[in-house]
Every structure is written in C-alpha cells, then in structure tokens.
Image (cartoon, rainbow, N blue to C red):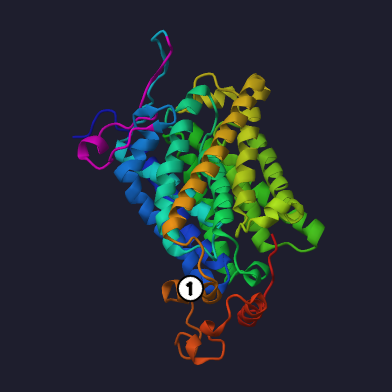
Amino acid sequence: MLPKWLNKGDNAWQLIAATLVGLQSMPGLVILYGSIVKKKWAVNSAFMALYAFASSLLVWVLVGYRMAFGEKLLPFWGKAGPALSESFLVKRSSLPATAHFYNNGTLETARVEPFFPQAAMVFFEFTYAAITVILLAGSVLGRMNIKAWMAFSPLWLIFSYTIGAFSLWGGGFLYQWGVMDYSGGYVVHLSSGVSGFTAAYWVGPRLKCDKERFSPNNILLMITGAGLLWMGWSGFNGGQPMSSGISAAISILNTHICAATSLLMWTFLDVIFFEKPSVIGAIQGMMTGLVCITAGSGVVQSWAALLMGIVSGSIPWFTMMILHKKSALLQKVDDTLGVFHTHAVAGLIGGLMTGILAVPELCDDNITSIPGQKGMAYGGGIDQMLKQIAGAMFIILLNVVTTTVLLLIIRVFIPLRMPDDELMTGDDAAHGEEAYALWGDGEKFDATRHETIVHHVPVNDEVSLHSRCSNNDSHGVTIQL
C-alpha cells in the first residue's frame, strides 16, 4: 500500500531528473573526454570518468550520502552511515535532515520533506557527487597515473565533496547562514574547478609536446558528448526544487537561456579576436553558461539569466584566452581542459550574481531556501553579497587543503604522474588498449614492430622526447588555452 505522503508526479520527475544528471556523466562526459583529447589518451580519459561514476555510487550509499545530507555531526559535516536498508530508503525524504533552532529553543529552519521516498533522494544527490568528481578529472587528463586516480577520486568525495554539500545544502552552517547555492554553483562547480586546478599542480604537467599539440581526436563525438551534457542540465537544475512545480519549469528555461547566450557570446568573441568561430570554443561557452546559471537558475528572472549568459560568455573567455597566457601562476599549472576557467571562474560569477539578482518571490517558492532570502538588488543588502563571498572562500579553502593533503598522502604509495615513457605511448601503456583499430585489417598497431619503439627513447633527453612525440602526433588544429 502506498503511503499517503507519496506524490507520484514528484517522484517520477525526481527519478527522471536524476537519470538526466546521470546521463551527463555516463555517457555524456565519458564521450566528451574520450573525444576532446588526442587519440592516444581517448581510452584513459573516458575510463577515468567511467571509474569515477561507478566508485562514487558505492562510496555514496556506504557512507557519503549521510555525511552530506544526514543528521548533523559537526556544523560542516553529517554523521556517516549506510543508505542501504529498506527502513531508511522507503521512508519520506528530508532535506535538511536536521531542524535548526534559535538559542532560545524556538524553531528557525524546519526539516523540508518532499513528497517522494528517500531512495529517490539518495540517487538524485549521488548524480551530483559523481559529476563533480568527473569534472575535476578534466584538469589532469593526459598524464595522471590511473592507479592514483582510482585511489584519489573516492577519497576526495568523502573528505571534500561531502563537507561542501552538507555545509551549503544539507543544513550546515552556510546553509543556515543564508548563503545561496540553488543547484551547485559552489558545491559542484567551484569545488571541481578549484580542486582540479590544485590537483593539476601536484600531479605535474603533460609532456611538452602534448601541451603544444592536444587536438581533439573526434570533434563530432565531442559535440555529441557536449549535447548530452547540455540537455542533461534540465535535470541538473530542474530537479533541485524537489517537485514538478513552477520552480522546476522556471529553472529549466533559465538554464537554457543562459547556456545559449553564453555559447553565442564566446563564439562572437572568437570571431572578433581570432576571425574564426571555434567549435571547442563554443562548447566552452556552453559550459560556462550552464555553470554560471546553476547557482541561481530557479531564483532569478529570465532576463537575469540572459545577463548572466553574457557575463559568463565573456569573463571566462577573457581569463582563458587572454589572462591565462599572461599569468605566471596559470601558465605554471597544466589544467588540461581549462576546468579552472569553465567551472571555478564561472561558478564564482554565478554565485555572486545570484547574490545580486535573486528574486524574493522565487526564493520563497523554492522549498530548500531559507525563509526571507533575496538578492542585493531586491533588498538583500550588502549582507547577502558578503555571505556569497564568504561561502565561496570556504569552498575554495576547503578544496585546496583537502585536495593537497589527499594527493600528498597518495603519492607516498603511488606516483601521481605516469613516467615519461608511458606518457609517450598513452592508452596502450596505461590499459593495454587503444581507442581505434586503424592498423591493417582491424589489427591494432604494434609499436614493437616499428622503428618508433617507445622503450628505446631516452626519457631524460627532452629533445629526443619532443622529437618522438612530434613524429607520432597526427596533424591538426592546435588548441591553445
């Protein structure tokens, strides 16, 4: 017999939204990563995303969900525990799980109880955790030791993601304080951008020739993966209201308005300054628009979403295409896909603009908002902007520290970066597999039968390495970040 509190429409929409977010990772980012890198890294890049998706689910149901959305343990962390028992999963979901009271004992923030079971909530929130880890991977593609990644990704979810999620979403101190992060501008995107940049620093750079020539191996598949990511964002932002109501519709519309505007803005800037529209640039613009609107998609008006698209298509373009080339710090860190620009910068912009443009009536319609929230332009005052800045600073500090500590511990046992001779070979050295069988009649190319044998390359000779890499590279357009 179905419980009286169950709303079949809300439950159906939440499961659909969760599936859409899951499709952004598997297969969306798997396809995007496997095709946006050069051919020799296609398998490795796709597998890093695939592994992170699977491992994140097990970590999530064993301990992660309750650390992020369970009962309060610390102001920034929930009590760890499994989310596997029938008694837990069939009961009515709640977010946050712990009510908050004033010092005098009166209720300040009640528990929110959507009209669907805990099982739907667990799966929905898992897809956010998984995609955050996978987005982080974009910064270290093309050289991170796969075994180090296999150790790092689940540990990062436990010790970094769950803290940020509880603090901002699960009833932690930033949530109670009133920092607005509608659907993950801070929890997902600022976190992945900052952690990815930090990880790229500790893992080290790609080979010099890979940095100079890193053309996509399949642009059409790259667009396909990006398309899955874009359309999946309907679930990413549309599922956040926890119901199939008006907030979900507004959130979805605003999401696509911002993404389209940002894509066009990025493309126009490419044409103005470089005289040609770039497909990979358009995808970057799409991404920054999606990231920017995430922090406020359900609480800003549609004209504000258009404005956010203009800003997200221009400021990250400037930081990636202009500032990056002039900054010694940014040049020092080899961020493969520019995740710092597309997620950290765009996520920060989105959080700050939400603090300005959030509409009180839309905030009140969002069941997970603190009562009385509103942007600075609607009476929220400078206090709301200070809260948004403080929330961003917490997320940045959290991810720099936890990512650094985890990688320094892991590198004691596992090298973080592949050795140079394996970097020369790529997928075959890391996995014994290659993405495309193009040699002979479907036969995989055997490097040991040809003069370009990898093991004879003097790995300490930078000139020889560069020469070997250049000889093996296919010709194509060089994408410079």
Secondary structure character of the magenta stretch overall:
loop
| Residue 312: quadrant of the picture | top right
Q: Position of residue 51 (x, y in %)?
A: 40, 59
Within the magenta stretch, is there residue 287? Answer: no
Name the residue at 54% across, 18% down.
372
Judging from the image, what secondary structure is the residue with disc 1 in? Answer: helix
In this rendering, the answer to whether 232 lies above or below 173 is below
- Residues shaded magenta: 78-103
Asked whether 73 or 287 is in front, the reply is: 73
Out of 317 and 271, give the one closest to the viewer.
317
Q: Position of residue 203 (x, y in %)?
A: 54, 58
In the picture, measured across the screen, residue 402 lies left or right of residue 259, that is left
Q: Is residue 257 visible?
A: no
Residue in the picture at 54% in, 62% down: 141
For the point 50% across and 86% down, the residue is 447
Indicate the position of residue 119 as horizontal and vertical percent values.
30, 40
Q: How many marks?
A: 1
State the image quarter where residue 394 is shown. top right
Q: Amino acid at mark 1?
A: Asp
Residue 303: percent from the left, percent from the top?
A: 67, 35
Judge whether 196 appears above or below 27 on screen. above
Residue beneath disc 1: 427
